[in-house]
Amino acid sequence: VACKPKLMEKLSDVICDENQRWWGAEMGIETGSAELAKKIMPAKAKPFKVEEWPEIVVQGAGILKDNNVIPACTLITGLPQETDDDVVKTIELMDELKDFPSLIVPLFFVPMGKLKEKEWFKKEQLTETREELLITCLRHDMRWVKRISEIYFSRSISHQLIKPLYYLFIKLVEWQGNKKGVL
C-alpha cells in the first residue's frame, strides 16, 4: 500500500460509488517492533527498509483511510525471539493507529513457513505486557466497531434486520470487558 498509493486510489475509484462508500482489505501488521521485523520478516517491508516498519504501517493505514478502505488488521504476539520491549513497541504502534478506522485482530504465534520448526505459543507465555497488547486491541476494536457497523448496516433493509443482533453482541462484549475491568 505504502509502495503504490496511486494503485489504491485507482482501486477505490473502481470499487466505490454512491452505493458502496467503503471497501475492506486485510493488512498484516504482525509487529510494531522494527527489530523483531528485521529478525522474522526482513523482506516484508520491501522496497522500504525493514527498520522503517512501524512508519510504513502508519503510512499504509493513512493511505487506506484516504481511499475508503477499512482494513481488518492482524498482528502476532508470541513470535520467536519476541521480548517485552517488542510487545511495548507494538502497543505504541496501536496507539499511533487509533485514529484509523480498522479492526485489529491479535493472533498468537503458530509455527509455519521459515519458522515452522519453532514452538507454538503457549498460555504460560502470556505475560502482563502481552495481556496489555490484547486489551489495547480490544479497546481499539470496540471504539471502531460501532462506527464501522453504522456504515455497514445502513446499506439495505436486510442489514437493518440483522443490526439489532449485532449490537446485542457488541453490548455483550462491552459488558464482559467492563466486568473484567479492561474497557
Image (cartoon, rainbow, N blue to C red):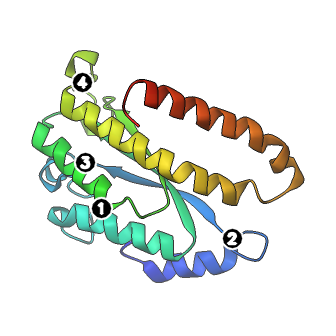
Instruction: Name above or below for residue 52 compared with residue 116.
Output: below
Disc 1 from disc 3: Cα separation: 9 Å
User: Disc 2 or 4, which lies upstream in sequence?
Assistant: 2
Say what secondary structure mark 1 lies in: helix
Specify the amino acid type for callout 2. Answer: Arg
Disc 4 from disc 3: Cα separation: 15 Å
User: At which x and y percent is residue 27?
Assistant: 44, 55
Say what secondary structure mark 3 lies in: helix
The residue labelled by disc 3 is 91
The residue labelled by disc 2 is 21
Specify the amino acid type for callout 1. Answer: Glu
Say what secondary structure mark 4 lies in: loop
Which image quarter holds the N terminus? bottom left
The residue labelled by disc 1 is 96
Given contact means CB atoms under 8 Å apart, are the residues at marks 2 and 1 in contact? no
Question: Is residue 41 at all visible to an observer of this figure?
Answer: no
Other-residue count near label 3 (Cα within 10 Å), few / some / many at <14 / 14–19 / ≥20: many
Task: Indicate left or right for 73 with 41 as reference.
Answer: right
